[in-house]
Image (cartoon, rainbow, N blue to C red):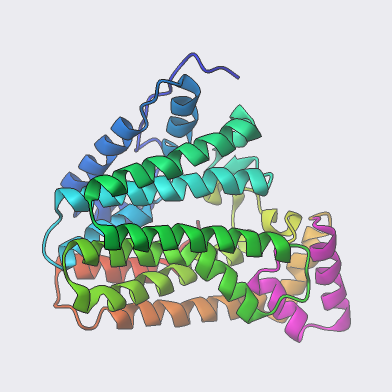
């Protein structure tokens, strides 16, 4: 481990699905500005801060949250310099949560390569996550919009509460579907919603704030539900993470909750033991139980419900290439392999 070399930032270092690439191309100029701002704001007098920051940002990923902010701005008119700054803020907050999540979850692989905590250690990952949170709020202060600042302060607080809820419910096989959804709304979907709503705030379009919030929230729920399906059915090479990681963290996700609700006594015992021991030693047996009970199919059906709610939330907007992109993202949320 060293802090003497700053890794170059390369937003194209990890490939994205073609649909995402095409959608991003529709706001390419603004997205390039977001990338440039991220690079600028990652600069620090402390080399290790830059090393860890560049490492995780350069890992790529779909970068959906800043993309949502830019597309929402275009649906409402145009992308301003404030929208660009807000999109960078959203990405910084998301990146901070990833750094903290991987430490809490003791994760070793993300997007096909070692996590930051695996590479640099837990302490640097946590502290650089803090740096990214504070950098995001420095940028928000520059926007000079007290209502938006309040909105994002509330969002980050809700995300933190979601993380704590997930932590305290880990290893609990009695978690029900409503409790599961509460966690994913707080931990994941709220930042999707806030990216969309914040764009409307900056566009001075209060009449559209709720609809865009609803679109983002349901989109985020659908994405997370499919993530939870892929944890038991996905290809590790495509996903860039290990299958069964949720099980080793004792997360009672919806495919498992469905087994607990509908499975035989034997299937419920298999899942209960795996959740309570936070072990994926019996991963094959758990996958078999999920298959027998239709856990993946049930979770997919719930994700489709939220996809449809996201699509419905866009009904009030006139047709446009950007609205079409938002609709494509909703479709992609349930039709993906990673």
In the rendered image, the quadrant that contains the N terminus is top right
Q: Is residue 51 above or below residue 172?
A: above
Q: Residue 302: x and y, percent?
A: 53, 80
Q: Residue furthest bottom?
A: 262
- Whether residue 335 can be seen here: no
Q: Residue 236: x and y, percent?
A: 60, 50
Q: Is residue 112 above or below residue 49?
A: below
Q: Quadrant of residue 22?
A: bottom left
Whether residue 88 appears in magenta in the rendering, the answer is no
Magenta stretch mostly in which secondary structure? helix
- Which residue is at the front of the view, 15 or 179? 179
Whether residue 265 appears in magenta in the rendering, the answer is yes
> What's drawn in magenta, residue-wise?
251-279
Q: Residue 197: x and y, percent?
A: 30, 67
- Which residue is at the front of the view, 293 or 123? 123
Q: Is residue 293 above or below residue 273?
A: below
Identity of the residue drawn at 71% across and 72% down: 256
- Which residue is at the front of the view, 246 or 193? 193
- Whether residue 129 can be seen here: yes
Identity of the residue drawn at 60% across and 67% down: 229
- Which residue is at the front of the view, 50 or 136? 136
Q: Quadrant of residue 10?
A: top left
Q: Residue furthest top?
A: 4
167 on left or right of 163: right
293 on left or right of 143: right
218 on left or right of 97: left
Q: Residue 315: x and y, percent?
A: 24, 83
Q: Is residue 213 above or below residue 101?
A: below
Identity of the residue drawn at 70% across and 68% down: 252
Identity of the residue drawn at 20% across and 61% down: 202
């Amino acid at each position: 481990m060293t802090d003497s070399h700053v890794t170059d930032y390369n937003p194209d270092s990890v490939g994205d699905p073609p649909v995402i690439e095409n959608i991003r191309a529709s706001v390419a100029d603004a997205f390039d500005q977001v990338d440039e701002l991220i690079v600028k704001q990652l600069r620090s007098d402390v080399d290790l801060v830059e090393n860890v920051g560049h490492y995780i940002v350069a890992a790529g990923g779909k970068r959906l949250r800043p993309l949502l902010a830019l597309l929402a701005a275009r649906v409402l008119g145009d992308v301003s310099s404030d929208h660009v700054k807000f999109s960078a803020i959203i990405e910084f907050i998301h990146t901070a949560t990833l750094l903290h999540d991987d430490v809490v979850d003791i994760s070793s692989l993300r997007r096909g390569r070692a996590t930051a905590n695996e590479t640099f250690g837990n302490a640097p990952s946590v502290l650089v996550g803090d740096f990214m949170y504070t950098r995001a709020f420095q940028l928000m202060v520059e926007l000079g919009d007290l209502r938006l600042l309040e909105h994002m302060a509330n969002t980050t607080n809700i995300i933190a509460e979601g993380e704590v809820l997930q932590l305290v419910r880990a290893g609990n096989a009695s978690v029900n579907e409503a409790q599961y959804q509460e966690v994913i709304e707080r931990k994941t979907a709220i930042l999707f919603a806030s990216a969309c709503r914040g764009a409307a705030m900056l566009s001075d379009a209060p009449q559209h704030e709720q609809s865009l919030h609803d679109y983002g929230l349901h989109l985020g729920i659908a994405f997370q539900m499919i993530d939870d399906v892929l944890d038991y059915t996905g290809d590790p090479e495509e996903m860039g993470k290990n299958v069964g990681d949720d099980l080793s963290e004792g997360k009672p996700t919806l495919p498992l909750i469905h087994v607990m609700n509908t499975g035989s006594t034997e299937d419920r015992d298999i899942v209960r033991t795996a959740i309570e021991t936070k072990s994926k030693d019996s991963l094959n047996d758990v996958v078999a139980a999920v298959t027998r009970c239709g856990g993946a199919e049930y979770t997919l059906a719930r994700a489709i419900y939220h996809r449809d709610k996201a699509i419905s939330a866009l009904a009030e907007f006139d047709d446009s290439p950007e609205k079409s992109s938002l609709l494509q993202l909703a479709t992609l949320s349930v039709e993906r392999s990673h």
